[in-house]
Image (spheres, rainbow, N blue to C red):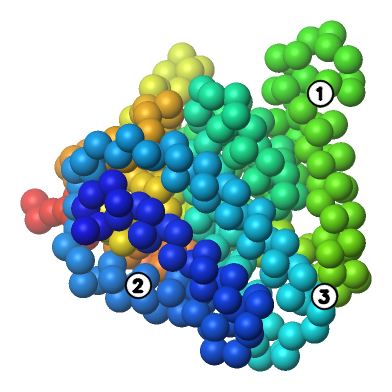
Amino acid sequence: MLRSGAGFALASLTPVPLLVLGATLGGAWAWGALLYLTLFAFAMDELIAWADAPDSEFPAGDLLAAALAVAHFAVFGLVVWAFGRGIAPVQGAALFLGAGLFFGQISNANAHELIHRGSRVLHGLGKWVYISLLFGHHSSAHPLVHHRHVGTARDPNTARAGEGFYAFAARAWPAGFGAGLRAETARRGDAPAWRHPYALYLSGALGFMALAFLIGGWTGLAAFLGLALFAQSQLLVSDYVQHYGLVRREADGKPEPVGPEHSWNAPHVFTGHMMLHAPRHSAHHLHPARRFPELDVPDVQIAPLLPLSLPAMSFIALAPPLWRCIMDPRLAYWQSEPLGDPHGQPLAA
C-alpha cells in the first residue's frame, strides 16, 4: 500500500484527525499523533523493506500537498484554541509535542515541496505555511541561497564537519535570514520596499501572532510561539542532518557542480512517504523542480545513506557527542572515497 501514490496520503494525513481529536476531546487522543509520529513511524520503517525507486505515478500529488497546507492552518488554530481554553498539563505536553512534530516534519516537508512548484497558488500556500511558522524567510533563502551554495561556506544551512547541532542552529538561523534578505534585495533592484518579500514575511508573522492571541489569549499566543520555535528547530535539524560535513570541492575558485554525494539520504519507506520523499535529498538537489513521487535514492556507490531514518537521526543530532560518534566515521570515509553500502558503512576493500 505504501509503495503507491495513495501511501503518501495515508502516511502524511493520518496525524491530522488524531490532532483534531486531541485538541477537541483531549484524554488519550492527545497522545495519538505523538505516538504515531515517533514509535509507530520508527517501527514501520524497521518493518518495511527499504525502497530506492520512484513510486508509481501519483497525479493527485499537488492536490495532496494543497490539502496538507490547508490542514496545517486548521490544526494550528485548533491546537492554539485548545491551549487557550485550558488543557491538563500532561495532555497538553503530549498535544504540544505531537503538533510540533507534525508541523516540523510534515508541514515543513510539504511547504518545502510547494515553494518549488511553478504554480503561484501552490507556491503561495507553501510560503504562507512558512510564514505561519514565523520562518517566512525560508521561502527566499532556500531556493536563492541554499540550492545555489549548498556544500560551500556561503550556505548557512550546510553544517560543518564536527559542528554540533546547537552551534549550527545558532549560526544558521540569523545567517540564513540575512543571506535570503540580501539575495531578494539584489534580485528585486529598485522595487518599492513595501513589495519586498521580507515585508510580507514580517507583517505576516505579526498577523499570525495577533490571530493566535485572538483565538487563545496570552496562553494561546505562548503556545503558538512555542510551536513555531519547535517546528523551526526541526527544519534546521533536517538541514543539519542532510548536509552534515559534505562539501563541494573547489577548482579555480569555483565549487564543483552539485552531485548526489553532497546530501545524506534515507530510503526508509514509511517516513519517506510521511515526509513526501524529503529524505531522498540528493535527487531533490539534482532536480529541484521534480515532484516528490518522482524522486529516487541515488546509487549507494555514489551517494551516502543515513544509518537510520531522517526523523531518528534528527533526534540523535540533539545529542552532539552521540551524533559525532555515529556520523564522523561515515563522513571521514565519504570525504576520502565515495563508496558505501545501503547501511552507510564503507564496503570492504
Q: Is disc 2 placed on a helix, strand or loop?
A: helix
281 over 117 or under it: above or below: below
Circle on res. 75: none
Relative to residue 139, is residue 286 drawn left or right? left
Image-based side of 142 in relation to 306, left or right: right
**Helix, strand or loop for disc 3:** helix
Compared to residue 150, the image places residue 205 above or below, namely below
Q: Amino acid at mark 3?
A: Gly
| Rendered image quadrant of residue 199 | top right
Q: Which residue is mark 2?
A: 42
Residue closer to the observer: 54 or 16: 16
Which is more N-terminal, label 1 or label 2?
A: 2
- The one nearer the camera, 35 or 246, is 35
- Residue 12 appears in view: yes
Q: Which residue is mark 1?
A: 196
Q: Which residue is mark 3?
A: 84
Count of numbered tags:
3
In space, the residues marked 3 and 2 are separated at their CA atoms by: 32 Å
Q: Which quadrant, please, contains the N terminus?
A: bottom left
> Closest to the observer: 339 or 316?
316
Residue 190's image quarter? top right
